[in-house]
Amino acid sequence: MTDQAVPVKASSSPKARAPKPRQLNPLRQLLPFMLRYPMRLGLTVLFLLISAISSLAIPAALGGAIDEGFLEQNLENVGRYSWLIVGIAAIMALASGARFYFISVLGERVLADLRQASFRHLLSLDARYFDTHRVGELTSRLNGDVATIRGAIGSSFSLALRSMVTIIGAVAMMLLTSPVLTLAVVVAAPAILLPVIGFSRRLRRMSRSTQDRLADLSAMATEMLGSTRTVKSFTQEGVQAKAYDARSEESFAAEKTRLTARSMLVGMVIFLGTAAIVFLVWWGARAVFEGSVTAGQLAQFLVYALMASGALTNVSEVLGTLQTVAGATERLTEILSTQSEIKEKANPTKLPEPALGTVEFRNVAFSYDRDGGEPVLHNLSFCVGAGETVALVGASGSGKSTILSLLQRFYDVTGGAILVDGIDLRDVGVFALRQRFAYVEQEPTIFAGTIAENIRFGKPEASMAEVEAAARAALVHDFVVDLPLGYDAVVGERGVMLSGGQKQRLAIARAILKNAPILLLDEATSALDAQSEQLVQQALEYLMRGRTTLVIAHRLATIRDADTILVLEQGRIIDQGTHDELVAKGGRYAELAKLQFRVD
């Protein structure tokens, strides 16, 4: 349960997130992933060059066949050149197949690495990042954007590389064939290239906008489908469906705009390319009539021109796809470039072994607002000795859950220090620190797996015997044995197949299996009925034995035996003592006790 609303500054609108145009192509961010596999990359380039060179050799052979065969009416030369062309075509076919295979496998490997790196990096980011980013949007980046890249990186990337090599090779061969005709190409080329470059920049901005709108759509769907009971309870199906329709239409409009621009680009390139070829035919015919080139050279030149034109058309089409890929790559690399605000030292201090189980807050101040807004905690100081139970009591917003979050270093303190086993937690490795805690939330996270998998989350390497022992201690075994599949029973997403008490006991079993020296309980029984609360309380009593415990509770009956009760108000400790001492003082705690125990 969160005590303080976290200010959300990150805008979810595509317009707000649209980046300024950058000079460097985001596709370059894929290079480090590709360079991990030099053998595959080298073979891809090798077969790409063989395929391109082979294709460029065919027109040269064709020109020879015309000049030395058809014009001289020499059938032997025609046959010799024909067999040469067939041999070159065989080499080109084999090289093209090998090139496609290696670029496709390399692309899939890069995508897998990119997805894994993004997910691993997301898990390493601090809680503040997830406070300001919707899970549905992040899921869209991991799934939708990767799918976008997959759809193009194998075929489109390969085609783009091959087309670029073909254009360069064709222009070089055209220059060797006839410098005079090549001059016409040099004159016509800017008329084709400049519009392509201009439209490409527009396409990238449009592609990014489209993907951002799709991410918003995904985020809304994830949120609403994960809360269907609330939606139905408040009869919001129609309202939310209309809201989804509106966002879907916005996404469609953005994609339609992008497709319109891309269609214009393709049509423009085809028209300009065709016009250029017609101009070349006229220019070449005049050169043949003047005797500056032969008919075979003209045919050879025109084939190279057609190859260059076709490759340029391919590039223009692929460019639209690659702009979409660039947008998707940019969104993924934004995740990888985000740095966690929780910084670890290069050589962290090791916590003492065996664990002491002590906690100390020294003049701790904290604000969720990075810019120094209203603090949630003010100069908070208290100590928890080994094996002691300290309860935190106060109204919502008093800072109770924030204390548990800071103790696990989900956030860093604004001022003061927190010590675990006598060491400032900022000096300790985050993994080692969190291994010291077992956390049971008010609404425990239950994963969409089996009961055994959920318990084993506390200790992934645990044997089935250890899982069952933890389940027995948490009073989980009693209801599990009645299930047809027992510990292999699937609990559904967020534990939908379990009752509130069963989910809570499952979370306690997970904490028992972790066997951490410090236990954190965030109102673990507040939402349960009397019978479930009694069972959960029994499980908690077993879990708390021999452990240092910090417990948040609204029901004071559950903390009457705590060694110390801290009464919080607006981030400050206004009173502390045992239950009997606080009741005797007649302060805020006594008022709460009087209200609750009179009702009970």
Image (spheres, rainbow, N blue to C red):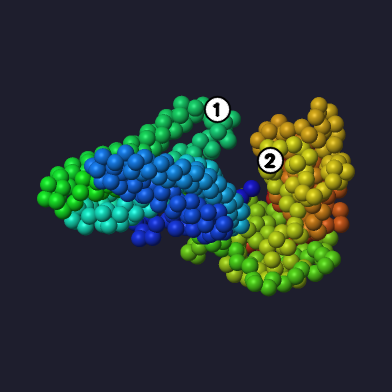
Mark 2 crowdedness (10 Å alpha carbons): few <14, some 14-19, many ≥20: some
Q: Nearer the viewer, residue 434 or 419?
A: 434
Mark 1 crowdedness (10 Å alpha carbons): few <14, some 14-19, many ≥20: few
Q: Residue at position x 22%, y 55% from top?
A: 178
Q: Secondary structure at mark 2?
A: loop
Work out whether 84 lies above or below 401.
Answer: above
Residue named by callout 1: 232
The answer to whether residue 430 of the structure is visible from this angle is yes
User: Residue 324 location, x and y as percent?
Assistant: 40, 46
Which mark is nearer the camera, 1 or 2?
A: 2
Tell me which corner region of the image, top left, top right, bottom left or bottom right, holds residue 539. top right
User: Residue 455 location, x and y as percent?
Assistant: 77, 43
Quadrant (top left/top right/bottom left/bottom right) for the C terminus: top right
Which amino acid type corresponds to the residue marked 1 in the rendered image? Lys
N-terminal label among 1 and 2: 1
User: Residue 389 location, x and y as percent?
Assistant: 80, 57
Q: Residue at position x 85%, y 42% from top?
A: 464
Which amino acid type corresponds to the residue marked 2 in the rendered image? Phe
Residue named by callout 2: 447
The answer to whether residue 362 of the structure is visible from this angle is no
Label total for image: 2
User: Residue 382 location, x and y as percent?
Assistant: 72, 66
